Amino acid sequence: MSKLLAVGTVAFDAIETPFGKTDKILGGSGTYVSLAASQFGVETGVVSVVGGDFPQSYLDMMNAKGIDTSGIEIIKDGKTFFWSGKYHNDMNSRDTLITELNVLEHFKPVVPQKFKDAAIVMLGNLHPLTQASVLDQMETAPKLVVLDTMNFWMDIALDDLHAVLKRVDVITINDEEARQLSGEYSLVNAAKKIHEMGPKYVVIKKGEHGALLFNKGKMFFAPALPLAEVYDPTGAGDTFAGGFCGYLAKTEDISFENMKNAIIYGSNLASFCVEKFGSQRMEELTEAEVKNRLHDFKELTQFDIELS
Amino acid sequence: MSKLLAVGTVAFDAIETPFGKTDKILGGSGTYVSLAASQFGVETGVVSVVGGDFPQSYLDMMNAKGIDTSGIEIIKDGKTFFWSGKYHNDMNSRDTLITELNVLEHFKPVVPQKFKDAAIVMLGNLHPLTQASVLDQMETAPKLVVLDTMNFWMDIALDDLHAVLKRVDVITINDEEARQLSGEYSLVNAAKKIHEMGPKYVVIKKGEHGALLFNKGKMFFAPALPLAEVYDPTGAGDTFAGGFCGYLAKTEDISFENMKNAIIYGSNLASFCVEKFGSQRMEELTEAEVKNRLHDFKELTQFDIELS
């Protein structure tokens, strides 16, 4: 069992989908990553920042799940990062209605002493310089650094992104972003180009179309579980990443073969995340449910053709 | 080893993709289905129609592969069906430039006597009444009837389509068409509605995003093999269907578990089809290549998580 350090946002989200609308609820990449990782009982520390308006009850909930929140700085006279968005009918695209950076604007992550030797570091979607500053604080070289990013940083901080990518083992990125970063349309070619930028492992997230793992010529694919209804896709990508990291931290095996399992666990957890609004489903999720769904994933993907 | 009867078009295609442009080359659903099925050495008969302009060399090539072309009517003073299309850069969408129905306009399929007892019947994308007329000619009830269709027939002949669907075991359809036919956005719900129209098995083709097989609550998914370059997607869907039917005809096992294997073989063959223009790759494809790629599909999809 390795320690996992997750850097990301802890935020308020207000979400509208064809199924309904929420007020400000708990959100943020750090939240989803750590909730997913908590399924594996690994020691997870979150580094983030919130304002004085952030309810203690959310921190209590995370602590009750074994998540270490001592790295979440609370700025008493500041306001928590707030995002509001509305999903279109196809659930694949959304409009951002409101983004209030608030305390995130001047966020300087501080890694708690007890996580400076974390074996696995998950750098959530933040400015590449902020991501790099976390790696600078590590006292022991992590066994695995995983980075998530988005097109926004490619547009405004590409050089910084390239610099931090040289220090990263795994990048998780969606298909359109992989195309933008590499300038290649084919995801096979895109992964090859991104390998050359640093990451030995490239995970391309395709939302409802699953996720691909590339490692220098090797490929693995995990489908998303087809669901009757997707209530809210918010946090699914971060839940996927948290499941991936959490499983690797638990098993202490970062081989390609075990990363296949980690990708399946990521898809498994993400399939729950979208079943309710916000982080609600992840908060109530049990180990038995996850195991049960693993059977569904096996049924969905495993076949038995004799090869001669 | 069962007999396979494939009804569909045998045609000329002229194709433009970002990788190049062809003159009139061999195309048509009957062509692709039978070329795919020929990989399994099953006795395949094609029912179709061509004009006097159709080269004997194409028929010779099909015969050399063991495909029975006695059901391809040749109308000496008619012209062969011609389709021309241009693919966009993403290869997922295309514009039809020319459609000349020619001899297809008054096509009345005639099933050769020796295929009136075929165990598996593949009804390629044609008017639903034409598809039904083939079933009317069968002297022995087929073990499995597979039907392919498209949005065009939903627009102009929906009642006829519903009528023939009642006589069908498997429908293959793409995702947008499944949504149109069912009025459901979620593919899980769409499959449920389509089950109620007749087919016990619903295969939803998602192009580069793979294919789903539904059978009353059970699901299986086969990804498309991620490729560095897709040269020409023409015929991939029909090749998929031909691989599916050919494998089932060869193994004489139409259980859900064996259909999983058939779906994988369909994806396997389709991954070759797109590697060259038209049917070229399928004409030269060897058994060893197909076996080899089956290893790639296993690597891509199989994982080994212990379930307790």
Image (cartoon, coloured by chain):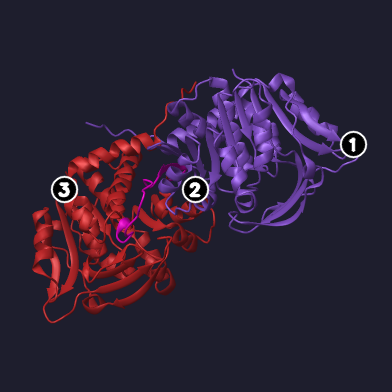
Chain colours: A purple, B red
Element carrying mark 2? helix
Q: In the rendered structure, does residue B291 fall within the stretch colored magenta?
A: no
Q: Which residue is mark 1?
A: A76
Range shown magenta? B215-236
Graded by Cα atoms within 10 Å as few (under 14), some (14 to 19) or many (20 or more), the crowding at tag 3 reads many
- Figure check: A146 above or below B160: above
Q: Chain of mark 1?
A: A
Graded by Cα atoms within 10 Å as few (under 14), some (14 to 19) or many (20 or more), the crowding at tag 1 reads few
Graded by Cα atoms within 10 Å as few (under 14), some (14 to 19) or many (20 or more), the crowding at tag 2 reads some
State how many labels appear: 3
* Amino acid at dot 2: His
Q: Which residue is mark 3?
A: B42
Q: Earlier in the sequence, mark 1 or mark 2?
A: 1
Q: Chain of mark 2?
A: A
Give the residue at x 27% y 70%: B14
List x then y, in percent, for residue B31.
21, 61
Q: Chain of mark 3?
A: B
Judge if badges 3 and 2 mark residues of a common chain.
Answer: no
Residue B216 visible in the shown view: no
Please give the label number shown on residue A48: none
Judge if badges 1 and 2 mark residues of a common chain.
Answer: yes
Say which of marks 1 and 2 sits in front.
Answer: 1
Q: Which residue is mark 2?
A: A209
